[in-house]
Image (cartoon, grey):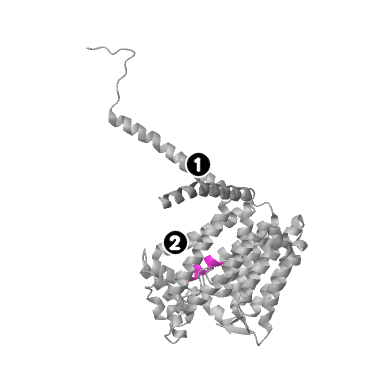
Amino acid sequence: MTAVGVGSRRRPAAGATKKKTAKQRQPAEVSRFAEWRTAAWASPTTSYYLIGGAGLLLLMLGLVMVLSASMVDSLNKSGGATPFTDFFDQLMFAGIGVPVALVASRFKPVWFRKLAWLILAGALGMQALLFVPSFAIEVGGNTNWVELPGVGTFQPSEFAKLGLAIWLGAVLATKGDLLRQWRHALMPGVLVAGGFLGLVLRGHDLGTALIIMALVAGALWVAGVPASLFVLLGSFAAAAAGFLVFSSRNRRERIEQFLGMSSDSSSIDTFQVDRALEALGSGGLSGVGLGASRIKWRGLPAAQDDYIFAIIGEELGLLGTLLVIMLFVALAIGITRVVTRHPDRFVKITAAALGAWIVGQAFVNIGVVIGVLPVIGVPLPLLSAGGSSLVTTLIALGVLLSFARTEPGAKQAFAARRGSMRRSLAVLGPRLVSRARG
């Protein structure tokens, strides 16, 4: 029997060495990924890229889907001449909204605060046009559209959302700790918001009124009003909404149909929901293909407007609908980061109001299309056809980008990235030129 010396070592098998190396490599890779993830989340520019990236992707997807969903309606409008009428209108409004949003993103938040009263006055003036008979237009039983000579048709309540969000941020931020007292919380913020609600409800637009309520609730919540007042206002809003629903035959029938208490299957709302669910079900996992929707040829009302999510589900499938939901979740995360990380109370409150409006309206629209909410009649932000909604939503995103640019450390991070880009171009430039000559 051969003795093994103290200093001698048994050589491990080759397979054991490979397994050990792989085990050592895996924790290092996981550690590097965890470090990158932590650094990316902690970066002061993450909010900016989440808001801007999600907004840009939603806008691009919206233009493509409006082109697809509106072809049938455009052919009907033009007498078969062109299927691009509604798409060109949407593209024009995107061409207006994007530059304005870019300009808004370069403004400092202090300027929005200084202009808050002027913005509110402009929104109020637009809303007052609904009481001028020669300008007001009734669509679908709601008088919430205005047509001005030389300007065109627009929806004032969309601008009211933007103006009210900025104004509430300025007023509630100025109040500060005084908001713990009911009278300071109610005056003038809740009073003015109630006035706008009254003007919107005067045109029988309950859907927009509910979104404005969500906007106001988001602002009040972040501003820190007493919980008792919040509960009181919420109870009053719920009671008022119930009264408005049951005082209108049309709204009452919608609720009855949603709850299954009505056997009338011939109503337009029932038809819309049934066709939307049929479209979503026929899309499967990956959809029938872009532009290949069949339900839009079968008369789905508002296919490019309130029910565009159904067309997305049919043409792009479950994956397409999940992409839309994930983009709105990413947008919500970016806005939440601004609310929690920014030191300016005005920015916090305004961002919360804008987020409650855009993200809240998105999920209300999706809830209606998939049948978990009664028909309310609000568009899907950035995706549905409609100039007023698209332009105001883009401007709101520009305001949010302005807020994200002024997060603590964001200015220095952007400057460092620009400097790194310049250095990279300075190094690569001469090499590319010499290769081109060679």
Label 1 near label 2: C-beta < 8 Å?
no
The total number of labels drawn is 2
**Residue 349: image x %, image y %?**
67, 59
Q: Amino acid at mark 2?
A: Leu
How far apart in space, not on screen, are marks 2 and 1 (Cα)? 28 Å
Write down the quadrant of residue 179 in the picture.
bottom right
- Callout 1 secondary element: helix
Whole-percent x, y for residue 284 in the image? 36, 66
Q: Nearer the viewer, residue 109 or 213?
A: 109
Front residue of 304/271: it is: 304
Judging by the rendered image, the residue that carries numbered circle 1 is 35
Secondary structure of the residue carrying numbered label 2: helix
Residue 138 as seen in the image, left or right of residue 288: right
Q: Which residue is mark 2?
A: 322
Q: Nearer the viewer, residue 213 or 255?
A: 213
Q: Amino acid at mark 1?
A: Glu
- Name the residue at 55% across, 59% down: 52
Mark 2 or mark 1, earlier in chain: 1
Relative height, residue 322 to residue 337 (above, below): below
108 falls in the magenta region: no
User: Which stretch is magenta?
Assistant: 361-369
Q: Quadrant of residue 332?
A: bottom right
Residue under the point 44% across and 61% down: 322
For the N terminus, which image quadrant?
Answer: top left
Q: Which residue sits furthest front?
A: 437
Mark 2 crowd level (few <14, some 14–19, many ≥20, 10 Å Cα) = few
The reply, left or right, for residue 393 in relation to residue 429 is right
Q: Residue furthest left?
A: 1
